[in-house]
Image (cartoon, coloured by chain):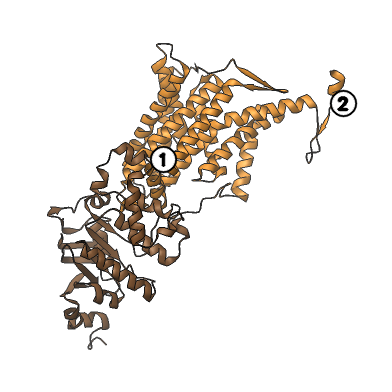
Chain colours: A brown, B orange
Amino acid sequence: MLELHRLTKHFGGVRAVDGVDLIVNPGEVLGLIGPNGSGKSTTVNLICGLFPLTSGLIMFKGEDISALPPHERVTRGIARTFQNIRLFGQLTVWQNLWVAQNSAEQRRQNPVRRWFGGGGSAREDIGRTLEFFDLAHKRDELAGNLAFGEQRRLEFARAFAAKPVLLLLDEPAAGMNAEEIDQLDARIRTLRDTGMAILLIEHHVELVMSVADRIAVLNFGQKIAEGSPAEVQNNPLVREAYLGTATAA
Amino acid sequence: MAARRHCNRVYVPDSGFVVDYLDLIDAVQSVADGVLFGATYALLGIGFTLIFGVMHKINLSFAAASIGAAYVSLLILAGFKAPAILVFLTAALAGGVIGALVYLVGFKFIPLANPLATLMSTVGLLLLIDEIIVHSTDGVPLNYPALFSDVIIPAGPFNIRGDLVFVFVLGCVCMAVLLTLLYRTKLGLATRAVSQQPVASQLCGISITRVNLLTFVITGMVGGIAGAMTGAAIGMLSPLLSLPLTVKGLIVTVIGGLGSIPGAIIAGLVVGGLENFFQFFRGVTERDLYIMLLLFAFLVFKPGGLFATSAGRD
Protein backbone atom coordinates (compact mmCIF):
# COMPACT_ATOMS: atom_id res chain seq x y z
CA MET A 1 0.00 0.00 0.00
CA LEU A 2 2.64 2.52 1.09
CA GLU A 3 6.24 2.17 0.01
CA LEU A 4 9.03 4.54 0.96
CA HIS A 5 12.15 4.32 -1.20
CA ARG A 6 15.37 5.89 0.12
CA LEU A 7 13.30 8.58 1.84
CA THR A 8 15.63 11.48 2.73
CA LYS A 9 15.10 14.88 4.32
CA HIS A 10 17.88 17.28 5.26
CA PHE A 11 17.27 20.44 7.27
CA GLY A 12 20.38 22.45 6.48
CA GLY A 13 23.17 20.15 7.63
CA VAL A 14 20.93 17.94 9.77
CA ARG A 15 19.96 14.64 8.22
CA ALA A 16 16.57 14.25 9.87
CA VAL A 17 15.64 11.28 7.70
CA ASP A 18 18.42 9.56 5.82
CA GLY A 19 17.55 6.95 3.18
CA VAL A 20 14.72 5.11 4.91
CA ASP A 21 12.99 2.21 3.11
CA LEU A 22 9.66 1.18 4.56
CA ILE A 23 6.58 -0.76 3.45
CA VAL A 24 3.15 -0.68 5.09
CA ASN A 25 0.68 -3.35 3.94
CA PRO A 26 -3.12 -3.30 4.09
CA GLY A 27 -4.51 -4.84 7.26
CA GLU A 28 -1.23 -4.38 9.10
CA VAL A 29 -0.06 -2.20 11.96
CA LEU A 30 3.53 -1.08 11.51
CA GLY A 31 5.04 0.35 14.67
CA LEU A 32 7.68 3.01 14.13
CA ILE A 33 9.84 3.59 17.19
CA GLY A 34 13.15 5.21 18.02
CA PRO A 35 14.74 7.59 20.53
CA ASN A 36 13.78 11.28 20.55
CA GLY A 37 14.99 13.09 17.44
CA SER A 38 15.44 9.90 15.46
CA GLY A 39 13.23 11.14 12.60
CA LYS A 40 9.90 9.43 13.32
CA SER A 41 7.74 12.54 13.20
CA THR A 42 9.64 13.87 10.19
CA THR A 43 8.90 10.61 8.38
CA VAL A 44 5.18 11.03 9.06
CA ASN A 45 5.32 14.68 7.99
CA LEU A 46 6.98 13.63 4.74
CA ILE A 47 4.39 10.95 4.05
CA CYS A 48 1.52 13.38 4.46
CA GLY A 49 3.32 16.06 2.49
CA LEU A 50 4.07 18.81 4.99
CA PHE A 51 7.59 19.34 3.62
CA PRO A 52 9.13 18.54 0.25
CA LEU A 53 11.53 15.58 0.11
CA THR A 54 15.25 16.12 -0.27
CA SER A 55 15.38 12.90 -2.24
CA GLY A 56 13.65 9.54 -2.43
CA LEU A 57 10.22 8.38 -3.47
CA ILE A 58 6.84 7.85 -1.81
CA MET A 59 4.65 5.28 -3.57
CA PHE A 60 1.01 4.92 -2.53
CA LYS A 61 -1.27 2.36 -4.16
CA GLY A 62 1.30 2.01 -6.94
CA GLU A 63 1.49 5.73 -7.69
CA ASP A 64 4.26 8.20 -6.95
CA ILE A 65 2.73 10.80 -4.64
CA SER A 66 5.99 12.53 -3.65
CA ALA A 67 5.00 15.83 -5.27
CA LEU A 68 1.33 15.98 -4.34
CA PRO A 69 0.14 18.73 -1.96
CA PRO A 70 -1.12 17.47 1.44
CA HIS A 71 -4.84 17.88 0.80
CA GLU A 72 -4.68 15.72 -2.32
CA ARG A 73 -2.95 12.97 -0.40
CA VAL A 74 -5.88 13.02 2.03
CA THR A 75 -8.26 12.67 -0.90
CA ARG A 76 -6.32 9.60 -2.00
CA GLY A 77 -6.72 8.01 1.40
CA ILE A 78 -3.95 9.10 3.78
CA ALA A 79 -5.03 10.62 7.09
CA ARG A 80 -3.13 11.37 10.27
CA THR A 81 -3.37 12.48 13.87
CA PHE A 82 -1.04 14.89 15.61
CA GLN A 83 1.24 14.42 18.56
CA ASN A 84 0.24 17.82 19.94
CA ILE A 85 -3.52 18.03 19.52
CA ARG A 86 -4.61 20.25 16.64
CA LEU A 87 -8.38 20.24 16.70
CA PHE A 88 -10.56 23.04 15.36
CA GLY A 89 -11.28 24.34 18.84
CA GLN A 90 -14.05 26.79 17.89
CA LEU A 91 -15.98 24.13 15.98
CA THR A 92 -18.22 21.53 17.60
CA VAL A 93 -17.27 17.85 17.73
CA TRP A 94 -19.74 17.11 14.95
CA GLN A 95 -18.42 19.96 12.78
CA ASN A 96 -14.84 18.80 13.26
CA LEU A 97 -15.77 15.50 11.67
CA TRP A 98 -17.91 17.06 8.95
CA VAL A 99 -15.14 19.38 7.79
CA ALA A 100 -12.77 16.44 7.60
CA GLN A 101 -14.91 14.40 5.22
CA ASN A 102 -12.81 14.89 2.11
CA SER A 103 -12.11 11.46 0.68
CA ALA A 104 -12.39 10.90 -3.07
CA GLU A 105 -15.72 9.14 -2.58
CA GLN A 106 -17.08 11.95 -0.43
CA ARG A 107 -15.87 14.50 -2.98
CA ARG A 108 -17.90 12.88 -5.73
CA GLN A 109 -21.02 14.57 -4.36
CA ASN A 110 -22.55 17.48 -6.16
CA PRO A 111 -20.28 20.39 -5.10
CA VAL A 112 -23.18 22.76 -4.41
CA ARG A 113 -24.76 20.29 -1.99
CA ARG A 114 -21.38 19.37 -0.59
CA TRP A 115 -20.27 22.90 0.26
CA PHE A 116 -23.56 24.72 0.82
CA GLY A 117 -25.87 21.94 2.02
CA GLY A 118 -26.54 21.26 5.66
CA GLY A 119 -24.52 18.05 5.79
CA GLY A 120 -27.59 15.80 5.72
CA SER A 121 -25.95 13.07 3.69
CA ALA A 122 -23.00 13.02 6.06
CA ARG A 123 -25.13 12.62 9.16
CA GLU A 124 -25.25 8.83 9.27
CA ASP A 125 -21.56 8.38 8.66
CA ILE A 126 -20.62 10.87 11.33
CA GLY A 127 -23.08 9.33 13.76
CA ARG A 128 -21.40 5.95 13.37
CA THR A 129 -17.95 7.47 13.76
CA LEU A 130 -19.06 9.24 16.95
CA GLU A 131 -20.42 5.97 18.34
CA PHE A 132 -17.23 4.10 17.52
CA PHE A 133 -15.08 6.68 19.28
CA ASP A 134 -17.50 7.05 22.18
CA LEU A 135 -18.12 10.73 21.53
CA ALA A 136 -21.83 10.65 20.65
CA HIS A 137 -22.84 12.36 23.89
CA LYS A 138 -20.46 15.26 23.13
CA ARG A 139 -21.46 15.91 19.53
CA ASP A 140 -22.53 19.55 20.04
CA GLU A 141 -19.75 20.61 22.39
CA LEU A 142 -16.95 22.86 21.17
CA ALA A 143 -13.87 20.76 20.58
CA GLY A 144 -11.81 23.23 22.61
CA ASN A 145 -13.93 22.52 25.72
CA LEU A 146 -13.41 18.75 25.74
CA ALA A 147 -11.32 16.96 28.32
CA PHE A 148 -7.88 15.86 27.21
CA GLY A 149 -8.74 12.20 26.65
CA GLU A 150 -11.80 13.18 24.62
CA GLN A 151 -9.72 15.53 22.50
CA ARG A 152 -7.34 12.67 21.73
CA ARG A 153 -10.28 10.50 20.71
CA LEU A 154 -11.65 13.29 18.53
CA GLU A 155 -8.28 13.63 16.80
CA PHE A 156 -8.42 9.96 15.98
CA ALA A 157 -12.07 10.22 14.91
CA ARG A 158 -11.33 13.22 12.69
CA ALA A 159 -8.57 11.33 10.89
CA PHE A 160 -10.98 8.41 10.48
CA ALA A 161 -13.76 10.66 9.12
CA ALA A 162 -12.02 11.02 5.74
CA LYS A 163 -12.29 7.21 5.27
CA PRO A 164 -8.55 6.69 4.89
CA VAL A 165 -6.94 3.45 3.76
CA LEU A 166 -3.68 4.45 5.42
CA LEU A 167 -3.77 5.97 8.88
CA LEU A 168 -0.73 7.68 10.41
CA LEU A 169 -0.98 7.85 14.20
CA ASP A 170 1.60 10.16 15.76
CA GLU A 171 1.84 9.23 19.45
CA PRO A 172 -1.89 8.65 19.97
CA ALA A 173 -1.38 7.42 23.53
CA ALA A 174 0.58 10.43 24.81
CA GLY A 175 -0.91 11.58 28.10
CA MET A 176 -3.50 8.80 28.27
CA ASN A 177 -4.23 6.67 31.32
CA ALA A 178 -4.14 2.86 31.29
CA GLU A 179 -7.83 2.43 30.62
CA GLU A 180 -7.78 4.85 27.70
CA ILE A 181 -4.76 3.07 26.25
CA ASP A 182 -6.66 -0.23 26.39
CA GLN A 183 -9.54 1.33 24.46
CA LEU A 184 -7.09 2.79 21.95
CA ASP A 185 -5.50 -0.63 21.52
CA ALA A 186 -8.91 -2.18 20.83
CA ARG A 187 -9.85 0.52 18.31
CA ILE A 188 -6.58 0.15 16.40
CA ARG A 189 -7.18 -3.60 16.17
CA THR A 190 -10.75 -3.11 14.94
CA LEU A 191 -9.61 -0.75 12.21
CA ARG A 192 -6.77 -3.05 11.20
CA ASP A 193 -9.23 -5.92 10.86
CA THR A 194 -11.21 -3.87 8.34
CA GLY A 195 -8.11 -3.88 6.13
CA MET A 196 -6.79 -0.43 6.97
CA ALA A 197 -3.01 0.06 6.93
CA ILE A 198 -1.79 1.78 10.09
CA LEU A 199 1.56 3.39 10.80
CA LEU A 200 1.87 3.85 14.54
CA ILE A 201 4.49 6.09 16.11
CA GLU A 202 4.51 5.59 19.82
CA HIS A 203 6.72 5.95 22.87
CA HIS A 204 4.47 3.75 24.95
CA VAL A 205 6.39 0.48 24.44
CA GLU A 206 3.71 -1.82 25.83
CA LEU A 207 1.11 -0.56 23.37
CA VAL A 208 3.43 -0.93 20.36
CA MET A 209 4.54 -4.40 21.37
CA SER A 210 0.94 -5.47 21.88
CA VAL A 211 -0.72 -4.04 18.81
CA ALA A 212 1.98 -3.86 16.11
CA ASP A 213 2.40 -6.67 13.61
CA ARG A 214 5.85 -5.44 12.63
CA ILE A 215 8.11 -2.82 14.11
CA ALA A 216 10.72 -0.61 12.45
CA VAL A 217 13.31 1.22 14.53
CA LEU A 218 14.86 4.55 13.54
CA ASN A 219 17.99 6.11 14.96
CA PHE A 220 19.65 9.29 13.65
CA GLY A 221 17.34 9.23 10.64
CA GLN A 222 18.27 5.71 9.59
CA LYS A 223 16.41 2.45 9.92
CA ILE A 224 18.47 0.23 12.19
CA ALA A 225 16.09 -2.71 12.62
CA GLU A 226 12.82 -4.13 11.38
CA GLY A 227 10.89 -7.25 12.28
CA SER A 228 8.34 -8.76 14.62
CA PRO A 229 8.07 -7.22 18.09
CA ALA A 230 10.04 -10.11 19.59
CA GLU A 231 12.85 -9.82 17.03
CA VAL A 232 13.17 -6.10 17.54
CA GLN A 233 13.21 -6.41 21.31
CA ASN A 234 16.19 -8.75 21.16
CA ASN A 235 18.11 -6.82 18.53
CA PRO A 236 21.45 -5.60 19.99
CA LEU A 237 21.47 -2.49 17.75
CA VAL A 238 18.13 -1.43 19.16
CA ARG A 239 19.29 -1.90 22.74
CA GLU A 240 22.37 0.14 21.92
CA ALA A 241 20.30 2.97 20.42
CA TYR A 242 18.09 3.18 23.46
CA LEU A 243 20.61 2.50 26.22
CA GLY A 244 23.91 3.63 24.67
CA THR A 245 26.91 1.38 23.99
CA ALA A 246 29.00 -0.03 26.79
CA THR A 247 32.15 1.54 25.31
CA ALA A 248 30.60 4.98 24.97
CA ALA A 249 29.54 4.86 28.60
CA MET B 1 -45.06 76.53 19.17
CA ALA B 2 -42.26 78.90 19.88
CA ALA B 3 -43.25 79.08 23.51
CA ARG B 4 -43.42 75.34 23.74
CA ARG B 5 -40.04 75.01 22.25
CA HIS B 6 -38.76 77.47 24.76
CA CYS B 7 -39.95 75.53 27.74
CA ASN B 8 -38.81 72.20 26.36
CA ARG B 9 -35.20 72.44 27.24
CA VAL B 10 -33.77 69.03 27.89
CA TYR B 11 -31.08 68.32 30.37
CA VAL B 12 -28.62 65.71 29.13
CA PRO B 13 -27.28 63.85 32.14
CA ASP B 14 -23.55 63.59 32.68
CA SER B 15 -22.64 66.08 29.98
CA GLY B 16 -23.74 69.18 31.86
CA PHE B 17 -25.13 70.60 28.62
CA VAL B 18 -28.59 71.96 28.28
CA VAL B 19 -29.66 71.29 24.74
CA ASP B 20 -32.53 72.85 22.91
CA TYR B 21 -35.33 70.39 22.12
CA LEU B 22 -35.12 70.83 18.35
CA ASP B 23 -31.37 70.62 18.45
CA LEU B 24 -31.73 67.34 20.24
CA ILE B 25 -34.10 66.04 17.58
CA ASP B 26 -31.64 67.08 14.90
CA ALA B 27 -28.79 65.43 16.76
CA VAL B 28 -30.67 62.17 17.21
CA GLN B 29 -31.74 62.29 13.58
CA SER B 30 -28.18 62.81 12.51
CA VAL B 31 -26.83 60.00 14.67
CA ALA B 32 -29.58 57.66 13.44
CA ASP B 33 -28.69 58.46 9.83
CA GLY B 34 -25.08 57.73 10.70
CA VAL B 35 -25.96 54.38 12.22
CA LEU B 36 -27.88 53.45 9.08
CA PHE B 37 -24.95 54.45 6.90
CA GLY B 38 -22.66 52.61 9.34
CA ALA B 39 -23.85 49.38 7.73
CA THR B 40 -21.39 50.24 4.96
CA TYR B 41 -18.54 50.51 7.43
CA ALA B 42 -19.66 47.26 9.02
CA LEU B 43 -19.43 45.45 5.68
CA LEU B 44 -15.99 46.94 5.00
CA GLY B 45 -14.88 45.95 8.49
CA ILE B 46 -16.14 42.41 7.90
CA GLY B 47 -14.10 42.28 4.71
CA PHE B 48 -10.89 43.27 6.47
CA THR B 49 -11.63 40.98 9.39
CA LEU B 50 -12.45 37.90 7.30
CA ILE B 51 -9.25 38.09 5.33
CA PHE B 52 -7.32 38.69 8.51
CA GLY B 53 -9.13 35.71 10.01
CA VAL B 54 -8.09 33.19 7.38
CA MET B 55 -4.71 34.55 6.30
CA HIS B 56 -3.59 36.67 9.26
CA LYS B 57 -2.81 39.38 6.73
CA ILE B 58 -4.24 42.84 6.21
CA ASN B 59 -5.53 43.54 2.72
CA LEU B 60 -5.13 47.30 2.41
CA SER B 61 -6.52 47.37 -1.11
CA PHE B 62 -9.92 46.14 0.03
CA ALA B 63 -11.77 49.46 0.25
CA ALA B 64 -10.26 50.68 -3.03
CA ALA B 65 -11.33 47.42 -4.68
CA SER B 66 -14.83 47.96 -3.30
CA ILE B 67 -15.04 51.42 -4.81
CA GLY B 68 -13.52 49.98 -7.98
CA ALA B 69 -16.28 47.37 -8.13
CA ALA B 70 -18.90 50.09 -7.73
CA TYR B 71 -17.24 51.96 -10.61
CA VAL B 72 -17.28 48.85 -12.78
CA SER B 73 -20.99 48.47 -12.20
CA LEU B 74 -21.49 52.10 -13.26
CA LEU B 75 -19.35 51.76 -16.38
CA ILE B 76 -21.02 48.54 -17.50
CA LEU B 77 -24.51 49.84 -16.95
CA ALA B 78 -23.94 53.43 -18.10
CA GLY B 79 -25.06 52.55 -21.63
CA PHE B 80 -28.61 51.60 -20.82
CA LYS B 81 -30.78 52.69 -17.97
CA ALA B 82 -30.57 49.71 -15.65
CA PRO B 83 -32.59 49.48 -12.46
CA ALA B 84 -30.55 50.22 -9.36
CA ILE B 85 -30.87 46.69 -8.01
CA LEU B 86 -29.08 45.39 -11.12
CA VAL B 87 -26.34 47.93 -10.53
CA PHE B 88 -25.87 46.53 -7.03
CA LEU B 89 -25.72 42.96 -8.30
CA THR B 90 -23.15 43.91 -10.91
CA ALA B 91 -21.10 45.64 -8.23
CA ALA B 92 -21.13 42.43 -6.17
CA LEU B 93 -20.03 40.31 -9.14
CA ALA B 94 -17.34 42.81 -10.12
CA GLY B 95 -16.18 42.85 -6.50
CA GLY B 96 -15.84 39.06 -6.56
CA VAL B 97 -13.74 39.16 -9.73
CA ILE B 98 -11.55 41.97 -8.40
CA GLY B 99 -11.18 40.03 -5.12
CA ALA B 100 -9.89 36.99 -7.01
CA LEU B 101 -7.45 39.19 -8.97
CA VAL B 102 -6.22 40.84 -5.77
CA TYR B 103 -5.55 37.40 -4.29
CA LEU B 104 -3.71 36.15 -7.37
CA VAL B 105 -1.63 39.31 -7.81
CA GLY B 106 -1.10 40.40 -4.22
CA PHE B 107 -1.01 37.15 -2.20
CA LYS B 108 -0.71 33.91 -4.14
CA PHE B 109 2.90 34.29 -5.22
CA ILE B 110 4.12 36.56 -2.43
CA PRO B 111 6.04 34.90 0.42
CA LEU B 112 3.52 34.79 3.26
CA ALA B 113 6.16 34.24 5.91
CA ASN B 114 7.29 37.84 5.52
CA PRO B 115 4.62 39.97 7.18
CA LEU B 116 5.60 43.11 5.26
CA ALA B 117 5.57 41.58 1.78
CA THR B 118 1.79 41.27 1.38
CA LEU B 119 1.24 44.57 3.20
CA MET B 120 3.36 46.32 0.56
CA SER B 121 1.77 44.42 -2.31
CA THR B 122 -1.70 45.46 -1.13
CA VAL B 123 -0.60 49.09 -0.75
CA GLY B 124 0.59 48.82 -4.34
CA LEU B 125 -2.75 47.42 -5.40
CA LEU B 126 -4.57 50.18 -3.52
CA LEU B 127 -2.64 52.81 -5.48
CA LEU B 128 -3.02 50.88 -8.72
CA ILE B 129 -6.80 50.60 -8.40
CA ASP B 130 -7.02 54.30 -7.54
CA GLU B 131 -4.94 55.21 -10.59
CA ILE B 132 -7.04 53.03 -12.87
CA ILE B 133 -10.16 54.75 -11.58
CA VAL B 134 -8.68 58.22 -12.02
CA HIS B 135 -7.47 57.49 -15.55
CA SER B 136 -10.64 55.85 -16.76
CA THR B 137 -12.90 58.61 -15.43
CA ASP B 138 -10.54 61.61 -15.69
CA GLY B 139 -10.97 61.92 -11.93
CA VAL B 140 -14.46 63.35 -12.33
CA PRO B 141 -17.00 62.17 -9.73
CA LEU B 142 -19.86 60.18 -11.27
CA ASN B 143 -23.47 60.12 -10.15
CA TYR B 144 -24.58 56.86 -8.62
CA PRO B 145 -28.19 55.67 -8.73
CA ALA B 146 -29.95 55.51 -5.40
CA LEU B 147 -32.98 53.45 -4.52
CA PHE B 148 -35.88 55.00 -2.60
CA SER B 149 -34.06 58.35 -2.40
CA ASP B 150 -37.40 60.15 -2.71
CA VAL B 151 -39.01 58.15 0.06
CA ILE B 152 -39.07 59.86 3.44
CA ILE B 153 -40.68 57.95 6.27
CA PRO B 154 -41.93 60.27 9.01
CA ALA B 155 -41.58 58.79 12.47
CA GLY B 156 -42.75 61.21 15.15
CA PRO B 157 -40.44 64.21 15.10
CA PHE B 158 -37.92 62.31 12.94
CA ASN B 159 -37.67 61.69 9.22
CA ILE B 160 -36.11 58.44 8.10
CA ARG B 161 -34.45 58.60 4.70
CA GLY B 162 -35.59 55.81 2.42
CA ASP B 163 -32.24 55.40 0.70
CA LEU B 164 -30.42 55.00 4.01
CA VAL B 165 -32.98 52.45 5.19
CA PHE B 166 -32.41 50.56 1.96
CA VAL B 167 -28.64 50.66 2.48
CA PHE B 168 -29.07 49.49 6.05
CA VAL B 169 -31.42 46.63 5.17
CA LEU B 170 -29.18 45.53 2.33
CA GLY B 171 -26.21 45.59 4.69
CA CYS B 172 -28.10 43.48 7.23
CA VAL B 173 -29.10 40.97 4.55
CA CYS B 174 -25.46 40.69 3.46
CA MET B 175 -24.34 40.11 7.04
CA ALA B 176 -27.04 37.49 7.60
CA VAL B 177 -26.08 35.64 4.43
CA LEU B 178 -22.42 35.84 5.34
CA LEU B 179 -22.94 34.59 8.90
CA THR B 180 -25.10 31.71 7.64
CA LEU B 181 -22.42 30.84 5.13
CA LEU B 182 -19.70 30.90 7.78
CA TYR B 183 -21.51 29.06 10.55
CA ARG B 184 -23.92 26.71 8.76
CA THR B 185 -22.24 25.46 5.59
CA LYS B 186 -19.26 23.20 5.13
CA LEU B 187 -17.56 25.90 3.08
CA GLY B 188 -17.78 28.30 6.00
CA LEU B 189 -16.63 25.68 8.49
CA ALA B 190 -13.66 24.90 6.24
CA THR B 191 -12.81 28.61 6.19
CA ARG B 192 -12.95 28.76 9.96
CA ALA B 193 -10.99 25.54 10.24
CA VAL B 194 -8.20 27.06 8.13
CA SER B 195 -8.15 30.16 10.31
CA GLN B 196 -7.94 28.08 13.51
CA GLN B 197 -5.52 25.35 12.40
CA PRO B 198 -3.94 25.88 8.99
CA VAL B 199 -1.73 22.80 9.14
CA ALA B 200 -4.37 20.42 10.46
CA SER B 201 -6.97 21.64 7.99
CA GLN B 202 -4.62 20.84 5.10
CA LEU B 203 -4.25 17.36 6.52
CA CYS B 204 -8.01 17.03 6.70
CA GLY B 205 -8.10 17.44 2.94
CA ILE B 206 -8.86 21.16 2.76
CA SER B 207 -6.98 23.11 0.10
CA ILE B 208 -5.76 26.29 1.78
CA THR B 209 -5.20 28.02 -1.57
CA ARG B 210 -8.78 27.35 -2.59
CA VAL B 211 -10.19 28.50 0.75
CA ASN B 212 -8.10 31.68 0.57
CA LEU B 213 -9.21 32.37 -2.99
CA LEU B 214 -12.85 31.81 -2.05
CA THR B 215 -12.50 34.11 0.94
CA PHE B 216 -11.19 36.83 -1.34
CA VAL B 217 -14.03 36.31 -3.79
CA ILE B 218 -16.67 36.39 -1.06
CA THR B 219 -15.22 39.40 0.75
CA GLY B 220 -14.81 41.04 -2.66
CA MET B 221 -18.53 40.59 -3.31
CA VAL B 222 -19.36 42.02 0.10
CA GLY B 223 -16.99 44.90 -0.66
CA GLY B 224 -18.62 45.51 -4.03
CA ILE B 225 -21.99 45.81 -2.32
CA ALA B 226 -20.47 48.11 0.30
CA GLY B 227 -19.01 50.26 -2.48
CA ALA B 228 -22.35 50.44 -4.24
CA MET B 229 -24.04 51.26 -0.91
CA THR B 230 -21.59 54.11 -0.36
CA GLY B 231 -22.27 55.42 -3.83
CA ALA B 232 -26.01 55.13 -3.36
CA ALA B 233 -26.01 56.81 0.04
CA ILE B 234 -23.97 59.84 -1.01
CA GLY B 235 -25.25 59.87 -4.56
CA MET B 236 -21.90 59.76 -6.33
CA LEU B 237 -18.58 57.97 -6.68
CA SER B 238 -15.20 59.61 -6.55
CA PRO B 239 -11.67 58.21 -6.47
CA LEU B 240 -11.21 60.33 -3.35
CA LEU B 241 -13.47 57.92 -1.46
CA SER B 242 -11.14 54.96 -1.33
CA LEU B 243 -8.58 56.27 1.14
CA PRO B 244 -11.04 57.52 3.80
CA LEU B 245 -12.99 54.26 3.44
CA THR B 246 -9.79 52.26 3.89
CA VAL B 247 -9.08 54.18 7.09
CA LYS B 248 -12.68 53.78 8.35
CA GLY B 249 -12.65 50.08 7.54
CA LEU B 250 -9.42 49.59 9.46
CA ILE B 251 -10.70 51.63 12.42
CA VAL B 252 -13.86 49.52 12.50
CA THR B 253 -11.78 46.36 12.35
CA VAL B 254 -9.55 47.42 15.21
CA ILE B 255 -12.38 48.68 17.43
CA GLY B 256 -14.41 45.54 16.77
CA GLY B 257 -11.46 43.27 17.40
CA LEU B 258 -9.34 41.85 14.57
CA GLY B 259 -10.93 38.67 13.28
CA SER B 260 -14.29 39.19 15.00
CA ILE B 261 -17.32 39.51 12.72
CA PRO B 262 -19.87 40.54 15.38
CA GLY B 263 -17.27 43.08 16.51
CA ALA B 264 -16.98 44.52 13.00
CA ILE B 265 -20.77 44.82 12.70
CA ILE B 266 -21.20 46.63 16.01
CA ALA B 267 -18.14 48.81 15.53
CA GLY B 268 -19.31 49.73 12.02
CA LEU B 269 -22.67 50.96 13.28
CA VAL B 270 -21.08 52.74 16.25
CA VAL B 271 -18.48 54.50 14.12
CA GLY B 272 -21.17 55.50 11.62
CA GLY B 273 -23.31 56.96 14.40
CA LEU B 274 -20.45 58.71 16.19
CA GLU B 275 -19.19 60.17 12.95
CA ASN B 276 -22.46 62.03 12.47
CA PHE B 277 -22.64 62.84 16.17
CA PHE B 278 -19.30 64.61 16.03
CA GLN B 279 -20.15 66.16 12.70
CA PHE B 280 -23.32 67.58 14.23
CA PHE B 281 -21.66 69.06 17.29
CA ARG B 282 -18.17 69.88 16.04
CA GLY B 283 -18.52 70.26 12.27
CA VAL B 284 -17.31 68.21 9.34
CA THR B 285 -13.71 69.42 9.60
CA GLU B 286 -13.24 68.08 13.12
CA ARG B 287 -15.31 64.93 12.76
CA ASP B 288 -12.56 62.49 11.79
CA LEU B 289 -10.31 63.86 14.50
CA TYR B 290 -12.62 62.48 17.18
CA ILE B 291 -12.98 59.15 15.43
CA MET B 292 -9.19 58.92 15.40
CA LEU B 293 -9.14 59.79 19.10
CA LEU B 294 -11.61 56.97 19.69
CA LEU B 295 -9.30 54.61 17.82
CA PHE B 296 -6.41 55.90 19.90
CA ALA B 297 -8.34 55.27 23.10
CA PHE B 298 -9.07 51.71 22.00
CA LEU B 299 -5.47 51.07 21.03
CA VAL B 300 -4.30 52.24 24.45
CA PHE B 301 -6.98 50.84 26.75
CA LYS B 302 -8.48 47.93 24.85
CA PRO B 303 -6.08 46.95 22.08
CA GLY B 304 -7.96 43.69 21.46
CA GLY B 305 -11.10 45.59 20.51
CA LEU B 306 -14.66 45.00 21.65
CA PHE B 307 -14.53 41.29 20.90
CA ALA B 308 -10.95 40.18 21.27
CA THR B 309 -10.71 36.84 19.51
CA SER B 310 -8.87 34.20 21.44
CA ALA B 311 -6.35 32.92 18.95
CA GLY B 312 -7.27 29.36 18.03
CA ARG B 313 -3.73 28.50 17.01
CA ASP B 314 -1.04 26.85 19.02
**Mark 1 or mark 2: whose residue is earlier in sequence:** 2
Q: Position of residue A242 (x, y in %)?
A: 26, 80
- Give the SS element for disc 2: helix
Image height of B267 relative to A2, above or below: above
Q: Is residue B53 left or right of residue B154?
A: left
User: How far apart are the two marked residues, 1 and 2, measured between alpha carbons?
Assistant: 59 Å
- Judging from the image, mark 2 belongs to the subunit labelled B
Residue drawn 55% across the image and 32% down it: B39
Q: How dense is the environment of label 1, judged by Cα within 10 Å: few (below 14), some, or many (20 and up)?
A: some
Q: Is residue B26 left or right of residue B258?
A: right
Circle 1 or circle 2, nearest the eye: 2
Q: Nearer the viewer, residue B128 or A83?
A: A83
Work out whether disc 1 and disc 2 sit on a shared chain.
Answer: yes
Q: Where, by quadrant of the figure, is residue B199 drawn?
A: bottom left
Q: Amino acid at mark 2?
A: Cys
Q: Where, by quadrant of the figure, is residue A35 drawn?
A: bottom left
Residue drawn 30% across the image and 74% down it: A203
Q: Which residue is mark 1?
A: B120
Q: Which residue is mark 2?
A: B7
Which residue sits furthest top? B80
Q: Position of residue B235 (x, y in %)?
A: 54, 19
Q: Nearer the viewer, residue B233 or B162?
A: B162
Image height of A43 relative to B281, above or below: below
Residues under numbered marks 1 and 2 in contact, where contact means CB atoms less than 8 Å apart: no
Q: Nearer the viewer, residue A174 or B118?
A: A174
